[in-house]
């Protein structure tokens, strides 16, 4: 990167998160729908920012372990 300051994508993520929170609060959306949306957002951020480098260093198994991690998180969430 080489430059100081906040990246535009970081600002966009923060603004989008705040808008999503406000929208969910106004629509009284809670529970599974909010968690599912948040999980999708996190997975999107991982896929865009971190996974290309992970695939470069770890190979194709990175995708499998990512999906398994989300599966474990979903099972634990449901079991709660």
Image (cartoon, rainbow, N blue to C red):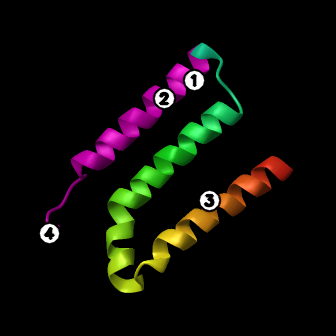
Q: Which mark is residue 24?
A: 1
What SS does tag 4 mark? loop
Query: Distance from label 1 to label 4 (Cα)?
Result: 37 Å
Q: Position of residue 35 (x, y in %)?
A: 63, 40
Could you tell me if the residues under marks 1 and 2 are in contact, i.e. CB atoms within 8 Å?
yes
**Mark 1 or mark 4: whose residue is earlier in sequence:** 4
**Mark 2 or mark 3: whose residue is earlier in sequence:** 2
- Could you tell me which quadrant the N terminus lies in? bottom left
Q: Position of residue 49 (x, y in %)?
A: 34, 61
Residue, disc 3 = 70
**Mark 2 or mark 4: whose residue is earlier in sequence:** 4
What SS does tag 3 mark? helix
For this orientation, the residue located farthest to the top is 26
What SS does tag 1 mark? helix
Per the image, is 17 magenta?
yes
Q: Would you say residue 80 is visible in this rendering?
A: no
Q: Position of residue 25 (x, y in %)?
A: 60, 21
Classify 2 as above or below 20: below
């Amino acid at each position: 990167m080489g430059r100081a300051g906040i990246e535009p994508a970081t600002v966009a993520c923060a603004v989008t998160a705040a808008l999503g929170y406000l929208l969910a609060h106004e629509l009284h959306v809670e529970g599974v729908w909010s968690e599912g949306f948040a999980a999708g957002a996190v997975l999107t951020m991982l896929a865009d920012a971190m996974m290309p480098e992970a695939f470069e260093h770890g190979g194709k198994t990175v995708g499998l372990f990512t999906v398994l991690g989300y599966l474990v998180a979903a099972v634990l969430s449901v079991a709660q």
